[in-house]
Amino acid sequence: QVQLVESGGGLVQPGGSLRLSCVASGSIFSRYPVGWYRQAPGKQRELVAAMPNSSKTNYADSVKGRFTISRDNAKNTVYLQMNSLKPEDTAVYYCNAGIGTLVYFTWGQGTQVTVSS
C-alpha cells in the first residue's frame, strides 16, 4: 500500500514563501498524474496544482503565478513552491496521484500552512 507523507508547512507572514514536499513509499509519481490539494476549515478539499505529465502543469486561478509544482521521480517526491502567500492560502495541504477529484491512493496526514501576521 502506497503511503504519502507531506512536510514543509508552518506559520508564515503574508508575502512569505514555503516549499512543501511529498514523499511516496513507491515510485508512483513517475507513472501517474500528480497534484497538490488543500482543505481549509469548513471547506471542501480543492486541487490547487497539478502535473498531468512531466512537461505540463495546471494551477487553480487562486494560486496561478504564485505556486509552482515540480517532481523528482528519482526521489519519489513532489514539491510545491509557494510564494507571495496570502491569508486565504491557510489550509492543510495534501498531495496525491490522480486526475482532478479522482485520486488513486489513501490520503496522507497533510501539512498545515498558516499565513498570518
Image: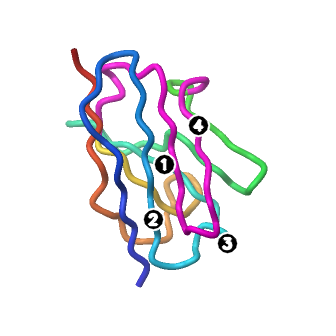
In terms of sequence position, does the residue under pointer 2 or pointer 3 come before the other? 2
Q: Which quarter of the picture shows residue 98?
A: bottom right
Q: In the image, which is nearer the foreground, mark 2 or mark 1?
A: 2
Q: Secondary structure at mark 3?
A: loop
Q: CA distance from mark 1 to mark 3?
A: 16 Å
Q: Secondary structure at mark 4?
A: strand
Magenta-drawn stretch contains 14: no
Q: Earlier in the sequence, mark 4 or mark 1?
A: 1
Quadrant location, the N terminus: bottom left
Tell me what residue is drawn at x 61 percent, y 48 percent.
Answer: 70
Q: Which mark is residue 23?
A: 2
Asked if the stretch drawn in magenta spans residue 75, the answer is yes
Left-right relation of 106 to 109: right
Circle 3 crowding by C-alpha within 10 Å: few under 14, some 14–19, many from 20: few
Task: Please tell me whether mark 4 or mark 1 is closer to you in this view.
Answer: 4
Q: State the SS at label 2.
A: strand
Which mark is first along the chain, 4 or 2? 2
Q: Amino acid at mark 3?
A: Arg
Residue at the location (33% across, 64% down)? 108
Q: Which residue is mark 3?
A: 31
Residue 47 or residue 113, whichever sits in front: 113
Q: CA distance from mark 2 to mark 3?
A: 14 Å
> Which comes sooner in the sequence, label 3 or label 4?
3
- Marks 2/3 in contact by CB < 8 Å: the verdict is no
The residue that disc 1 covers is 36
